[in-house]
Amino acid sequence: MMNLNELTIKEARVLLDEGKITSLEITEACLKQIETLDKDIHACLTVCADSARAEARVADKRLKAGERGMLLGIPYLCKDILMTKGIRTTAASKILENYIAPYDATVVMKLKGAGAVLLGKTNLDEFAHGASTENSAYGPTKNPYDLTRVAGGSSGGSAAAVASHMCLFALASDTGGSIRQPASFCGVVGIKPSYGKVSRFGLLSMTSSTDVVGPIAKTVFDAALVLNVIAGKDELDATTAPVEMTKIENKFANNTDAQPLSGVKVGLPTEYFLENLNPEVKDKIIAVANKLKLAGAEIKSVSLPYTKYGIPVYYIITPSEVSSNLARFDGIGWGLKKEEAVNLQEFYKKSRGAGFGPEAKRRIMLGTYTLSAGYYDAYYKKAQTVRTLIIEDFNKAFKKVDILLTPTSPHGAFKIGEQSNDPLAMYLEDIFVTGASLSGLPAISVPAGMIKVKDGNEMPLGAQLIAPRFQEDLMIQIAKLIV
Ligand code: GLN
């Protein structure tokens, strides 16, 4: 039999329910994998082996007593930007190095209730600012396919952990691509749910108007399972919507097996396939489109003319919200304290100066500037106006097609250090992922094969599907036909 940590959730479920394996055995296999590989990969910031074993034993008791549940006894890792009661939550920042949250994030609570086993917390770019996990104050996560390359970001730890079978799934967050891009770089599946589909309570806020929590998993089926458990209205997050997840199996009930997508229109946005797109990336996505065509879908070209404003708009709105959200880490209520300061001003300066890394500081400065009285109209307000045009682009496209298909990233994983001194190059990483974030739309990245990368061999590439708001069911159904 294969190593238990290599199982999908679906496979583990059958074996657990039949009593052929125990949750403790899968948990031990995952902990062993972490111990063996994480010295090199650095996907985890905290491993809570003892509490994981205790949780696995409880799950085994529940199973023995006849209880059933899709995630009962399934071990997972959680991005270290989600609060976990009694377990360190750092956001990969020095400012929260020793922070122990007094409560669980709603998603963590839900997984606890479902009997999932928390193995530990995964690495990320500090406060989720980044696209490579190189902005972590604790060092970068390496890509399991090539340890000289990044795992993507900001949820690089979660993606690398799933790809290297340290867990059966991981929780992550996506503000402007942070679930999808690392999933693409590490050859796994990542779902960014619609804004408001999953509670943000207990997620350390980055850009509150685009932040969402979602799963990274080995298969589309597994990711959908986790989403079903964590989604739903939460009284502790007023932006969650009371939208039920429709049963994922029913959508195409009337279609034949040979043509499951007959009647479905898939749009390829021309602005995502410009001339300078790496031809190998284009070929992979066209191959995915052909697969969907064989399944009965109609493939159409559509236009999203405001796409080119996605990055500039995102990089005004995000720092604006970041500068406001990070203001709470002042060393008094929250975060690192530098007691030697002589007055309050100096205390803030010293504590925040020592606690935040360069990217967080860059965003605080940019955002403070774009929100300042003299520049608010020229930057923040303008960006919000253009954001509405980007949202309208998608609304118009969804009158013509049911779903959009694009690359997740313009290339495979790059070398560690290759772009870290060039913030603009790093911001351009988000070219295909910011649109869905600014518009609150659900999107998924699924493996679309391997492509050649600069100075290296082949690395994974993801295909992205973007669906209308709250149409996760349709998106998942189509994604299942890709891999
Ligand atoms: N690369 C984006 C950024 O740096 C993604 C962030 C995210 O989704 N958390 O802002």
Image: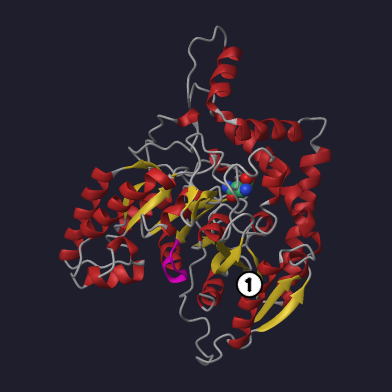
With respect to residue 155, does 272 lie above or below? below
Residue 239: x %, y % from top left: 56, 52
With respect to residue 331, does 16 lie above or below? below
**In the figure, residue 74 lies in which quadrant?**
bottom left
Q: Is residue 125 left or right of residue 435?
A: left
In the structure shown, which secondary structural element does the residue marked by tag 1 occupy?
helix
Q: Return the residue at label 1.
A: 284
In depth, the one of 93 and 457 nearer the eye is 457
Residue 399: x %, y % from top left: 73, 75
**Residue found 60% across the figure and 87% down from its top:** 294
Considering every residue shown, the one lying at the far top of the view is 342
**In the figure, residue 279 lies in which quadrant?**
bottom right
Residue 66: x %, y % from top left: 18, 68
Q: Is residue 307 left or right of residue 455?
A: right
In depth, the one of 289 and 33 nearer the eye is 33
- The answer to whether residue 40 of the structure is visible from this angle is yes
Asked if residue 71 is among those painted magenta in the image, a careful observer would answer no
Q: Is residue 292 left or right of residue 311?
A: left
- Per the rendered image, the range of residues in magenta is 217-222
**Residue found 71% across the figure and 44% down from its top:** 315
**In the figure, residue 320 lies in which quadrant?**
top right
Crowding at mark 1 (Cα within 10 Å: few <14, some 14-19, many 20+): many
- The answer to whether residue 232 of the structure is visible from this angle is no
Label 1 CB sits under 8 Å from any ligand 1 atom: no
Asked if residue 219 is among those painted magenta in the image, a careful observer would answer yes
Check disc 1 and give the amino acid type: Lys
**Residue found 80% across the figure and 66% down from its top:** 275
Residue 33: x %, y % from top left: 32, 53
In depth, the one of 101 and 413 nearer the eye is 413
